[in-house]
Each structure stands twice: as C-alpha cells, then as structure tokens.
Amino acid sequence: VLGDIMNNPYPYSNDNKRYQTINYYFRNKYHQKVAKIPLNAGFTCPNRDGTLATGGCIFCSEGGSGEFTENASLSVSEQIHLGKSQTSRKYQGEHYIAYFQAFTNTYAPVDRLRALYEEAITAPEIVALSIGTRPDCITPEILDLLEELNKRKPVFIEMGLQTSHDSTASFLNRAYPTETFTKTCHALAEAGIRVTAHIILGLPGETLDMELDTIRYLNTLPVSGIKISMLYVLKNTVLASYYEQHPFHILTMEEYINHLIICLS
C-alpha cells in the first residue's frame, strides 16, 4: 500500500506531505511554527459526573487527557506563563495557541467560559484559541460566544468522535449518538468555527472497513481537520481493566501505519 501511495501523482505540500498538516497550516498563516500551550480549567465531563454516565470514556485517563497541562488551581494566565517557559526548551517562536485540553472545555455556564477564554486570548502572543470538547456540550449561547471570540482571534473546536459507529461508541461510554456530532459540526461550521475531529484507529471490535466508514462519514461533514490516534491502553483506566479480563488485539506499528495510509488516502 505504501508503494502505491508514494507512486500516486498527487503534488506534495511544502512540508513534503501529500496532505496539509496543522503545522503547515500555521506556518503559512503566521510565517513560523506555532506552539500549543495545554490548559486545565478544572472541568469535568457529563459522562463522568453522572449527568449522562459515570467513569468517562473508557480509554481516557484520570486527568481527562490533560497530562501535559498545569495544575487547575492556577489561573489561565499563570498556566500560559508556565507553559511558555516549558515550551522554550525547544521552541523560540513568538506565537502560541491557548489549548483548553483537559476534560470537556465547554461544560460550564457561559459566563464562566467567557471569563476563561477572554483571559486566554488577551495575551498578545496567543494567536488562536483551541478548545477540546464534546458535541453535546455546545449550547446556542456557547455557540454565540465562540462566534463572537472567533472575530477577534481564530477559534478551533476539537471534538472527540473516535468512531462513527454508535455500537463502538456505546462500548467506549462516549454517551452521545453520532447524529449529535453531525448536527453540532454543521452548527459550528455555519458560525465560521473550525472543527477538528478526533478519531482512534484500532478500537476493540473495529475492522479497517469500519475505520474507513468513519473516514467516509467525516468526508461528508464541514470539518477543517482530523486528528488520528492509535488506540493505546493506559494504566488505571476502565479499558485497562477490560483488557486484563478480555485481551484484544492491539495494532502493531506496521498495521497502524498501513491503516493510517489507507485512511489518509
């Protein structure tokens, strides 16, 4: 498969890839590399706190996928300052993205969200706002806020889809139907908000054809980007307990690369 793709006569982008990476996008927009600063605002998720379910997505860590964020007790400004200091070890640029990463970052009253987002984009070095969330946690009022902020600095919404198959999503304890993702994606796009869909390859019970179903589904939507991850089993997660009791196949590096190439093409 790799040979077939490499012989395909599609033009390379400037970063030597046949698809546009987020790095390429920002380098062209700001004429330099842009670094993300992960933030933790102390949120939770509706499938953790009992609103929809408990335990969260079974693959997600205790930190809500925010292992590289600062302590939630610190203000957003303090976290940005510390994030810049840590990033300076390998990044000497002037532009940063404020990335609300841990848990569901629109799962709060709109007044609280406004205060947090405003504090993040006030810093002149912050050129964009990136918000990790769920499609069922964007109300009309929050959508209005995002649309307003997007007129000042670009807003990117990163939504965890993982799979378009509701049966797999139920196993993952995602706790929302795929149709919700569809509706929210269209609403965000109509408001001019860029959407990045997060998906996972190698989910238990899913075949390559099922993964391609997810890709085909996303190709029907107005998404601006796709983040593709390979499933890995973290300690102290529900998935880890399930894996111990019901071992399932984890993609090898070669298998993952092959799936990835096919999905990208």
Image: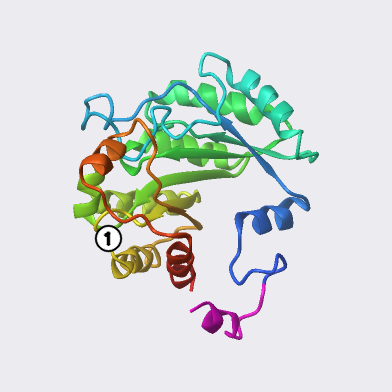
Density class for disc 1 (Cα within 10 Å; few <14, some 14-19, many ≥20) is few
Q: Nearer the viewer, residue 26 or 228?
A: 228
Q: Nearer the viewer, residue 175 or 130?
A: 175
Q: In this rendering, is residue 167 above or below 94?
A: below
Q: In this rendering, is residue 41 above or below 15?
A: above
The image position of residue 229, as x and y in percent, is 45, 52
Determine the residue positioned at 37% across, 43% down: 233
Determine the residue positioned at 39% across, 38% down: 234
Q: Which residues are magenta?
A: 1-12
The image position of residue 116, as x and y in percent, is 53, 24
Q: Nearer the viewer, residue 204 or 51?
A: 204
**Is 135 contained in the magenta span?**
no
The image position of residue 232, as x and y in percent, is 40, 47
Q: Nearer the viewer, residue 115 or 75?
A: 75
**Is 8 contained in the magenta span?**
yes
Left or right: 220 in relation to 115 = left
The amino acid beneath tag 1 is Glu
Left or right: 256 in relation to 57 = right
The image position of residue 228, as x and y in percent, is 46, 56
In the picture of the structure, the residue carrying the numbered disc 1 is 206
Q: Secondary structure at mark 1?
A: loop
Image quadrant in which you'd find residue 87: top right
| Count of marks overlaid on the render | 1
Q: Is residue 175 visible?
A: no
Q: Is residue 105 visible?
A: yes
What is the basis of the colouring in this image?
rainbow
Outermost residue on the top side: it is: 73
